[in-house]
Each structure stands twice: as structure tokens, then as C-alpha cells.
Image (tube, rainbow, N blue to C red):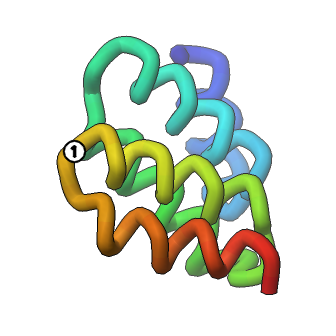
Amino acid sequence: MDMYRAALSLKPGMVDALCNLGSLLQSTGQLQQARDCYLQAIQKKPTCALAWLNLAGVTKSSGDAATALQYFRETVR
């Protein structure tokens, strides 16, 4: 995680680093921090299917299936 945070400190808008950091955070149960990473990635690149997909997954894991479905739909837009 430290390497992704270091990369983001140098270049905050790196969508790939945001998605990867989000995935690591999600895998360690840090769902809100993961969600924040995915939302930042989407803010920088609204067409990033991976960010939408990961956001849908973390949202579903948080128990909000209806919102997760909306995010899954964004993946294929």
C-alpha cells in the first residue's frame, strides 16, 4: 500500500494507482477507504470500467445491493 500512496503523493490523479490501492484496502476490510479511492478514480476518469466495477463490489459488500447494481450498469456504458 505504501508504494501506491507514494505514487499518488507524486501524481494524485493516477487512476490505476487509485484502483489498485482501493483493491488492497478492500481486501483488508477497509471498505470506506477503498470506496473513496474508487470514487476519486471515477472523478478523474468517469469512463474507467475497473473503478466502477470495484465500486460496485465494495458497495455490495457493504450491503447496498441496489446501489451496487447501478454501479455495475456504469461498467458497461
Residue 17 % position (x, y): 71, 40
Q: Depth check: 67 or 45 in front?
A: 67
Residue 55 % position (x, y): 49, 56
Residue 15 against residue 9 in the figure, above or below: below
At x 72%, y 70%, the residue is: 75
At x 34%, y 49%, the residue is: 60
Q: Depth check: 76 or 22 in front?
A: 76
Q: Which residue is mark 1?
A: 62
Q: Quadrant of residue 68?
A: bottom left
Location of the C terminus (image quadrant): bottom right
Q: Quadrant of residue 12?
A: bottom right
Left or right: residue 54 versus residue 20 is left
Residue 69 against residue 20 in the figure, above or below: below
Residue 35 against residue 33 in the figure, above or below: below
Q: Depth check: 16 or 64 in front?
A: 64
Q: Of the residues shown, which amino acid type is indicated by label 1?
A: Ser
Left or right: residue 24 versus residue 65 is right
SS for dot 1? loop
Left or right: residue 7 versus residue 68 is right
Q: Kindly give the residue lying farthest to the left in the view shown.
A: 63
Local packing at callout 1 (Cα closer than 10 Å; few below 14, some 14-19, many 20+) is few
Residue 25 % position (x, y): 42, 25
At x 51%, y 37%, the residue is: 22
Residue 44 % position (x, y): 67, 76
